[in-house]
Image: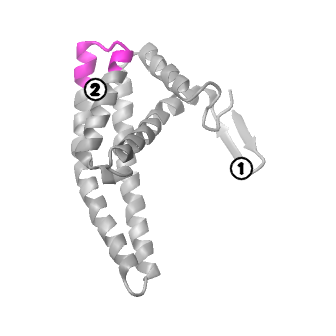
Amino acid sequence: MESTTDSKASTIPVRPKHRALWLLLAIPVALAGVFAFKAHAMGGGFGFAAGPEMRKAFMEHRLEKALDLVKATDSQRSSIKAIFAAMFTQMRPIHQQHKQLHDGITAAFAADTVDPAAVENLRVQATALIDQSSKIFTKALVDAAAVLTPQQRQTLIAHLQEMHGHGHHHGMQE
């Protein structure tokens, strides 16, 4: 087992055989960053503020490009699109809950006296929503990865590495 060490950070174990999985899981992070930037540039704001339909349209566009890149078959395209359609359906109530939390946070900070316990409760709820959506998204990624061949996944990983510059491995050593 290898580990990375930074004078400012603790040692983080990294198993070589898991690097490809970590890089594959980095795809949604990269896409989310690009999405947030594009949504903000189009006047939608960052994160959830862009609205679920705008996020869905953007993700569908990126998904098409990824499927084109790996030369996915019609069957693969159909399966992966169904996986992500189900994901969007599962995410809809999370987006609604996030809106309610956002309104609660706004109200908490607009009060004459800010209640630290109430703000902490809202933070805990927001963190739980992030975790829930992350689990749904990760499951969709794993399900989609199972539809692709190892070579197609490697093509995606190579593309991701190229997009982020050579040698940039999010804290992982070669």
Q: Quadrant of the N terminus?
A: top right
Q: Which of the two labelled residues, at mark 2 and mark 1, occupies the earlier sequence position?
A: 1
Residue identified by numbered label 1: 10
Give the magenta-colored segment's residue range: 67-79
- The part of the image, by quadrant, that contains residue 83 is top left
Residue 32 in the image, given as x and y percentages of width and height = 41, 41
Q: Is residue 33 magenta?
A: no
Three-letter amino acid code of the residue under disc 2: Ile
For mark 2, does the 10 Å Cα neighbourhood hold few (<14), some (14 to 19), or many (20 or more) residues?
A: many
Residue 96 in the image, given as x and y percentages of width and height = 24, 57
Q: Callout 1: helix, strand or loop? A: strand
Secondary structure mostly seen in the magenta stretch: helix
Q: Who's the residue at 37% across and 79% down the image? A: 110
In this view, 152 is above or below 55: above
Tell me: 38 left or right of 1.
left
Q: Who's the residue at 22% across and 35% down the image? A: 85
Three-letter amino acid code of the residue under disc 1: Ser
Q: Is residue 87 visible?
A: no
Q: Who's the residue at 35% across and 49% down the image? A: 133
For mark 1, does the 10 Å Cα neighbourhood hold few (<14), some (14 to 19), or many (20 or more) residues?
A: few
Q: Is residue 137 visible?
A: yes
Q: Callout 2: helix, strand or loop? A: helix
Furthest residue in direction right, as rendered: 7
Residue identified by numbered label 2: 80
In this view, 57 is above or below 11: above
In this view, 20 is above or below 134: above
- Indicate the colouring scheme: one colour
Furthest residue in direction bottom, as rendered: 112
In this view, 154 is above or below 57: above
